[in-house]
Amino acid sequence: MRLTDVAQFASGSLRGSRTRTLLMILAMSIGVAAVVVLTGLGEGARRYVVNQFSSLGTNLVIVLPGRTETAGIGPGMLIGQIPREISLDDAQAILRSRAVKRIAPLTVGSATLSRNALNREVVVLGSTSDLLEVRHMSLGIGKFLPPGDIHESASVCVLGNQMKRELFGNEQAVGQWVRLGDRRFRVIGVLAEQGESMGMRTDELVIVPVASAHQLFNTSGLFRVLVEAKSREAIEQAKHDAEQIMFQRHSGEKDVTVITQDAVLATFDRILTALTMAVGGIASISLAVAGILIMNVMLIAVSQRVKEIGLLKALGAPAAQIRNLFFAEAILLSSIGSIVGLILGEAGVFVIAKIYPSLPVVAPWWAVLAALGTALGTGIMFSVWPARRAARLDPVMALARS
Amino acid sequence: MIQLENVSRNFTVGDQQVAALRNIDLHIAAGDYVSIMGPSGSGKSTLLNLIGLLDRPSSGTYKLDGGNVTDLTDEQQARVRSEKIGFVFQSFHLVPRLTAAMNIELPLILAGISPAERKARVVQLLENYGLTDRADHRPDQLSGGQRQRVAIARATSMHPAVLLADEPTGNLDQTTGKEVLNLLEKLLEQHVALIVVTHDPVIGSRATRQLHMVDGQIISETGRST
């Protein structure tokens, strides 16, 4: 029997029982669509996090005071024992490394921001002019912090977009004076609207020169030093150099922690990929269910078509051929089901992407392949038994059945 | 051409052995017209199934065209069925979703014959059996006589050497039955061995050799071998 004839015969018998065929295709396609949509969501979440991280800046190495194996609060901090702080000179020393492009020291605190009768509590960020580049911020109007001596305090500030709106409304803000704590600052720029990135709303920030922030909060240490490596390849070198420089400057004591953005990112990436796979695995259970459904319906088809199978045998079809005919039906069913499911799934992903534009939902190629593979696999696997049963029918009994 | 030697067929029913055929010796030559008659349960159909290689004897040998087909594998037997044996059934056994033309084409498809030749043969067969204008009708749109004509066309599409008919007129009225018999008998001209199972003596008596079976044995044969 020719392959084209097998395919034609199989599609003929599928068309012969339309409702059954449609239901099976539906079951199969729901399974495939579920895998596509769910892994799409998982992948979307992963990409979302990755994007958030890269919006923090590229090729970042972060130096923070204290020595802990994981980033965060060390046990020393909890009992009031503060590790040796990172000074402004420490931060500038890191620039000596050839792998480092620029740095931005960070001091964080909160203060009351007020103008006339309006006032509110804000997060104040002390930094330098390079922060704009390092943190990938964008300026709306005016200027960012002026470059120059890192130790020099200037009474200028840059407002987050929302701060400007709350304090000035539609008025011109640049050139005006505001009060931060007990000091007066002149607004020299306003950040462009950026929304949220990694839990920090840049729209609600006020940025002042790092030396001014130190005076404002009466501190001298830095919260973080953001170090931008020259290239992706230079990240490890920059990390190593930063550690070495800090080591030397702190008289041979390893009391800072240096983490790379890549390392943090890789961890998130792993977690979320695992999550996506888990979700995809759960969804593929529905594929297995569809497979069992196919088996069930194929078994019914075999018993409904006993006479036809007997006839085919009488007409000279060997057992293998009859098996192949049923296989062909299963393959046809599951491939049509897979394709329909793929279309449904992609449509679902498209709709979700429309509803949640911030979530970059895309079904990963491996999930799509796996879904199609599982669909075809289960379809074929679960038709083995029915096909064998058909092939083994005794033709005399089959023909005698009325 | 067909040679059965000491063939028996036993069935196990429950824990009992039931002999459907007992020590049958039978020789049928090409072009023979044989009818097998007997009461129901006498083993007519079992004999026919054995000759058609749908069933295997419990003992004895069966030679077809000089070759022993008793011990062939299922695959080989299927091949012999495809090439040498045609079946016509009482209830026609047409595939309901296929048109008349496609039903006739079925054995040719199963045998893997090229589409071009298939088409030519089907057109010829449709014409031979007066079904040209019914080619695209499905079985449920055909009369009983037309259905059986489709079945005969299908049975002959591979030019078999043996044509086995199990009560071919059982579901037809007398006139159509006769027409169908005439069509079957015409095949004798092509030297086909025609074996008809029936319990209708009128039909049975048309055959040149009439075998009477009782209790799994051929008790008498009337007529003569040609």
Image (cartoon, rainbow, N blue to C red):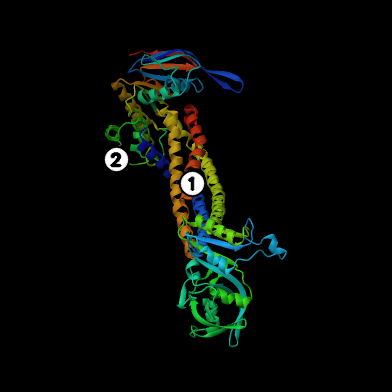
On screen, residue A265 above or below B203: below
Q: Residue at x 33, y 24 (%)?
A: B185
On screen, residue B33 above or below A380: above
Q: Position of residue B187 (x, y in %)?
A: 31, 24
Report if residue B210 is visible in the image: yes
Q: Amino acid at mark 2?
A: Asp
If the image is split into quadrants, where does the C terminus of chain B sit? top left
In this view, the residue in front, B226 or A309, is A309
Which label number is shown at residue B133? Answer: 2
Which label number is shown at residue A384? Answer: none
Q: Crowding near pointer 2: few (<14 within 10 Å), some, many (20+)?
A: few
Q: Position of residue B65 (x, y in %)?
A: 36, 16
On screen, residue A69 above or below B2: below
**Numbered disc 1: secondary structure:** helix
Report if residue A45 is visible in the image: no
User: Cα distance, mark 2 to mark 1?
Assistant: 51 Å
Which label number is shown at residue A370? Answer: 1
**How many marks can you see?**
2
Kindly report which numbered mark, 2 or 1, lies closer to the viewer in this rendering.
1
Q: Position of residue A234 (x, y in %)?
A: 47, 56
If the image is split into quadrants, where does the N terminus of chain B sit? top left
Is A216 on the left-hand or right-hand side of A59? right
- The reply to whether dot 2 and dot 1 touch (C-beta < 8 Å) is no
Query: Image quarter for residue B19?
Result: top right
Q: Position of residue A275 (x, y in %)?
A: 57, 53
Q: Are labels 2 and 1 assigned to the same chain?
A: no
Judging from the image, mark 1 belongs to the subunit labelled A
In this view, the residue in front, A138 or A199, is A138
In this view, the residue in front, A72 or B216, is A72
Q: Amino acid at mark 1?
A: Ala
Residue furthest to the bottom in view is: A116
**Numbered disc 2: secondary structure:** helix
